[in-house]
Image: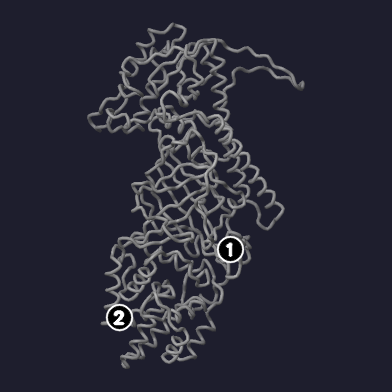
């Protein structure tokens, strides 16, 4: 909301000048940051109104630009994909909206360039207009709960400033009392109002801020009530325990406006964080009680990266240049997104709202951290987010033009959330790993693919290179841990990507992680246990456990393969090759088991999804997951058991090209034969696909 210095009647004549009468009344503000009442003399009132209007103008311009950007994105997503003309117009409108938002952000940077938000006395001051008598200058500002922002270097030295008598410490600590029931510290309403009333006696009558009809400070009770409902003070003794009136918290509230908790779609430029719907275009601030917004100076937000509808992962066929973005040659691997929940305090929260993107880093203590950063965005990529998972990914874009006010901004260390994948034959996403506040400090080491998976202390840890989604406003990456309840989704996520790639190696796993993944999948099939039951076991224990079964109880493998369904379907070629090798060994050693071995091998190949997977099963028919075999010899040995006709029949019916988005089924079923192309739930480009939204 903008506050004009004064208003007047306009006329239609070009270049005309409108004369207005400016009120000369004085102004009175309460400054919570210093627990002071500030008196502005009449001659300076127009100056203050102009400063307030200027601050609100460039803030609102940025919020408006972001709301318009979100609108343009919604219109693009609602555009008929079959109409190239409409699509081109909508794409250009999104690009134009992005430029306008970047220009508005640059204006904010220029205006706030010299504000050090972490240092007292040199920041953006938060002022609460006091009640005044009719006819006084404050009538040009909303009464009550509207917070007004003024740059401290614009305040003049001769303005009278009255500190509340009990405020012998910075901020408002002296007004905190401990609640016996809850043990929390709260602002004491009686002490606060008593001090304001006493202060009234020191100020001339024309500066009156006590309601003459009600005989009290008009806004104080609601301010105290709302403040105490939100605040959560551990102790008032340590200044670090109370940061609600620090310069960083003030800057956060100035950017956040009406909201201190919301969800956000990164591609919409924090539109949801700012609580701006498409229809909201003007009055962004002053919609809530000041106390409620003042209480904590914390932004609790949920971010969808790269957007709520996720990012399409793809690879290019061999022989196609890595830099090529030819859609008809792309192999879709499915959709991925990260859901990140963060508690952003002070300047960290302000930087998230003020900048165009996010930066993720790992702190010296292993904490996963985030703050706002000026990461480039691209309108075309925002429209249809895509990521080549095997490209040589650069996740360390140089940051330029960062807000000077945020140069020393704190970085949030309270992050949570999950990595998710879009499930087969469904638009829904499921967690396959949980984002934790702290890691062991080795995240992101090695690997050039979009994901880096390592095995540490019995758990798989997935490092998602969010900065690889170039043009989507993210830098760096974040690590998530695969827990017991997520292990099945993790295995499904990886298997579907392998199948959709044409059974190619995706280079996600680092070190011995891939071998451990294969061992766990094999044990799950053989022992008939949920794959999550192996989470937490060491590499050595897992390998010994599998080796003992192969040496002492190989018949269990045969029986398990015959009985297995989803775990067998979900196993990759390396696991199937290992199982095939063990069954070939048993066939040679135990003639009495040959009939069962033949049935099990047939079941194993019926679980293959592609011709390439059959080839890879033979190639990895080995006693060791890290060793390739002679594929021709492995096929010949298999044909001696099940017959060449069976293997030829399998190759005749399995597909050459994958069918992304479909459930995995046995290849001898009618359902398998019906699966063709991309399932409609995964095909965002199809005419029948539901259009996306920010909700």
State the image quarter where residue 643 is shown: bottom left
Q: Where is residue 315 in the image (x, y as percent from the top left)?
A: 55, 65
Q: Closer to the camera: disc 1 or disc 2?
A: 1
Q: In this view, does 29 lie to the left or right of 383?
A: left
Q: How far apart are marks 1 and 2 (CA)?
A: 42 Å
Question: Is the residue marked by circle 1 packed among few (<14), some (14-19), or many (20+) residues within 10 Å?
Answer: some
Q: Position of residue 434 (x, y in %)?
A: 38, 55
Name the residue rendered at 63%, 65% in the picture.
Answer: 328
Q: Can residue 681 be seen in this view?
A: no
Name the residue rendered at 40%, 23% in the picture.
Answer: 32
Q: Position of residue 76 (x, y in %)?
A: 63, 49
Provide the secondary structure element on which disc 1 rests. Answer: loop
Q: Position of residue 437 (x, y in %)?
A: 36, 48
Q: Looking at the image, is 345 positioned above or below residue 522?
A: above
Snapshot colouring? one colour
Question: Along the line of sight, which residue is nearer the eye, 509 or 293?
Answer: 509
Q: Mark 2 points at which residue?
A: 550
Q: Looking at the image, is 327 positioned above or below residue 288?
A: below
State the image quarter where residue 531 is shown: bottom left
Instruction: Tell me the quarter of the image containing the N terminus.
Output: top right
Q: Looking at the image, is 325 positioned above or below residue 362?
A: below
Q: Name the residue under label 1.
A: 322
């Amino acid at each position: 909301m903008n506050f004009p210095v004064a208003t007047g009647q306009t006329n239609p004549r070009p270049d005309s000048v409108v004369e207005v009468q400016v009120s000369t009344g004085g102004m009175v503000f309460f400054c919570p940051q210093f627990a002071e009442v500030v008196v502005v003399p009449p001659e300076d009132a127009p100056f203050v109104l102009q400063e307030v209007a200027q601050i609100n103008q460039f803030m609102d311009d940025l919020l408006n630009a972001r709301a318009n950007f979100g609108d343009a994105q919604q219109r693009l997503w609602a555009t008929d994909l079959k109409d190239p003309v409409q699509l081109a117009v909508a794409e250009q409108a999104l690009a134009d909206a992005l430029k306008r938002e970047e220009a508005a952000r640059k204006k904010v940077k220029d205006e706030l360039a010299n504000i050090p938000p972490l240092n007292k006395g040199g920041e953006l001051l938060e002022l609460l207009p006091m009640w005044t008598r009719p006819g006084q200058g404050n009538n040009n500002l909303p009464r009550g709960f509207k917070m007004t922002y003024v740059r401290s270097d614009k305040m003049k030295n001769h303005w009278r400033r009255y500190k509340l008598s009990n405020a012998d410490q910075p901020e408002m600590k002296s007004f905190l009392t401990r609640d016996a029931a809850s043990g929390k510290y709260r602002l004491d309403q009686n002490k606060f109002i008593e001090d304001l009333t006493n202060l009234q006696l020191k100020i001339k009558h024309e500066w009156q801020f006590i309601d003459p009809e009600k005989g009290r400070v008009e806004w104080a009770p609601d301010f105290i009530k709302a403040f105490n409902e939100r605040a959560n003070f551990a102790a008032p003794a340590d200044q670090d325990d109370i940061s609600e009136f620090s310069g960083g918290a003030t800057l956060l509230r100035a950017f956040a406006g009406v909201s201190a908790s919301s969800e956000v779609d990164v591609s919409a430029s924090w539109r949801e964080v700012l609580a701006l719907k498409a229809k909201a275009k003007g009055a962004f601030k002053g919609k809530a009680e000041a106390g409620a917004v003042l209480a904590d100076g914390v932004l609790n937000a949920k971010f969808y990266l790269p957007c709520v509808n996720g990012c399409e992962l793809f690879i290019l066929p061999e022989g196609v240049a890595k830099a090529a973005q030819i859609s008809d040659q792309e192999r879709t691997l499915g959709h991925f997104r990260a859901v990140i929940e963060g508690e952003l305090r002070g300047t960290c929260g302000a930087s998230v709202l003020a900048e165009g993107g996010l930066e993720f880093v790992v702190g010296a203590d292993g904490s996963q951290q985030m703050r706002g950063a000026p990461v480039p965005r691209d309108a075309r990529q925002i429209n249809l987010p895509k990521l080549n998972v095997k490209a040589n990914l650069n996740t360390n874009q140089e940051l330029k033009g960062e807000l000077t006010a945020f140069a020393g901004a704190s970085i949030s260390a309270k992050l949570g959330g999950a990595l998710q994948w879009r499930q087969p034959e469904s638009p829904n996403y499921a967690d396959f790993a949980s984002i934790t506040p702290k890691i062991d400090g080795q995240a992101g080491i090695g690997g050039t693919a979009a994901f880096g998976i390592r095995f540490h202390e019995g758990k798989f840890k997935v490092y998602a290179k969010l900065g690889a989604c170039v043009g989507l406003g993210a830098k760096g990456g974040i690590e998530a841990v695969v827990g017991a309840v997520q292990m099945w989704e993790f295995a499904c996520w990886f298997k579907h990507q392998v199948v959709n790639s044409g059974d190619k190696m995706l280079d996600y796993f680092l070190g011995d992680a891939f071998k451990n993944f294969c061992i766990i999948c094999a044990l799950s099939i053989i022992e008939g246990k949920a794959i999550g039951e192996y989470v937490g076991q060491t590499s050595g224990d897992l390998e010994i456990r599998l080796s003992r079964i192969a040496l002492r109880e190989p018949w269990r493998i045969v029986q398990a393969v015959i009985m297995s369904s989803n775990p067998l379907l979900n196993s990759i070629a390396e696991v199937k090759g290992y199982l095939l090798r063990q069954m070939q060994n048993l066939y040679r050693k135990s003639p009495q088991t040959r009939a069962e071995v033949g049935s099990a091998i047939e079941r194993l190949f019926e679980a293959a999804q592609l011709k390439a997977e059959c080839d890879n099963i033979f190639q990895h028919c080995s006693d060791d997951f890290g060793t390739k075999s002679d594929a021709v010899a492995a096929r010949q040995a298999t044909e001696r058991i099940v017959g060449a006709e069976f293997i030829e029949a399998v190759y005749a019916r399995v597909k050459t090209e994958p069918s992304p988005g479909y459930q995995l089924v046995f290849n001898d079923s009618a359902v398998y034969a019906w699966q063709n192309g991309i399932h409609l739930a995964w095909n965002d480009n199809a005419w029948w696909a539901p259009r996306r939204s920010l909700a």
